[in-house]
Amino acid sequence: MSKSNYNAPAVTKAVEVVDLLSQSTRPMGLSEIVRALDSNKNMCMRILRTLEAQGWVSAEEGPKYKLSLGLFQIASRPLARLDIVNEAFPLLRELWLNIGVNVYMGIPHQEKMLRVINFESTGRIRISSPVGTTTELCEGAGGMTLLAHSAQDRRDQIVGRAGKPSGKCTFCTPAKLPDALKKIERTKLAIHDQGSFRSLATPVFDHSGAVVAAVASTLPANGETLSAVKNTIGKRLIETAGAISCQMGYLK
């Protein structure tokens, strides 16, 4: 069976509409698009309305259509993630080999933290989540690091949701969240003490100074004080995150 038998005509036409608009230097009307693609008017209209509803196309007076930044943002996500994962992986692996406990990196994803790199502890106790896992930003040191360095309006929105009955906040009580976030932003280190184990995280910056990821570690308490963990694991995390930031073009 040839590949053409698997084609979806509507999808093919939608791709043609997007491609046409991407090449146009000005917004285009429906009739103009129909003529350029030698296509059915009703199909083009349905495609345009669907693309507009998804935020890929915007309509101006007329109406005339043009591509929006929504499509650009979607197209740029894999590249941004690929760059940071490629840069971070060998540095995080080296850190993991040296300290022997769980080391991971998370990035912002739809108001959650997405784990994109994970090295499991070499010890008997394993307390990590696999790559691809998402967690709420208020549920751990990694997410709190991302939240602490996000825009104020977004931070306020998530803090407000955490205070509701349905909110998820395990890092601290919702009432203490604002102060906790300020401290993390100031010290560049989040420490989550959960009794039997601790998690620590620190931010990774890109060339523009924006925080694009959190480098973190989760480890058993083993009777160590928080101060001792901060001065050992915390220090190594900060050094490694700094090296990744430099690879991403960040200049202090």
Image (tube, rainbow, N blue to C red):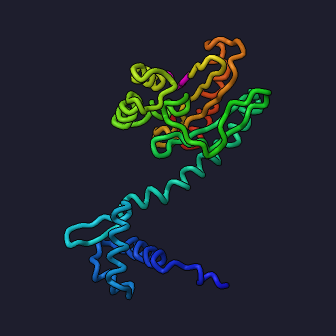
Q: Residue at x 38, y 88 (%)?
A: 38
Find residue 101 and report its image quarter: top right
Residue 159 quadrant: top left
Find residue 62 and report its horizontal and vertical position in percent.
Answer: 20, 73
Q: Is residue 66 left or right of residue 4?
A: left
In the visual, does 146 lie left or right of 218?
A: left
- What segment is highlighted magenta in the picture? 187-191
Q: Is residue 135 above or below residue 169?
A: below
Q: Quadrant of residue 147?
A: top left
Depth order, front residue of 102/210: 102
Q: Residue 185 versus residue 59: which sits nearer the camera?
A: 59
At x 38%, y 86%, the residue is: 39
In this figure, what is the number of numbered marks? 0
> Is 188 included in the stretch rendered in magenta?
yes
Give the residue at x 49% y 40%: 112
Task: Please tell me whether residue 245 belongs to the stretch shown in magenta.
Answer: no
Quarter of the image for the N terminus: give it: bottom right
Residue drawn 59% across and 46% down? 84
Residue 65 image position (x, y, % from top left): 30, 70
The correct choice, above or below, for 88 with respect to 21 in the image is: above
Q: Position of residue 141 (x, y in %)?
A: 55, 28
- List x then y, in percent, for residue 125: 75, 27
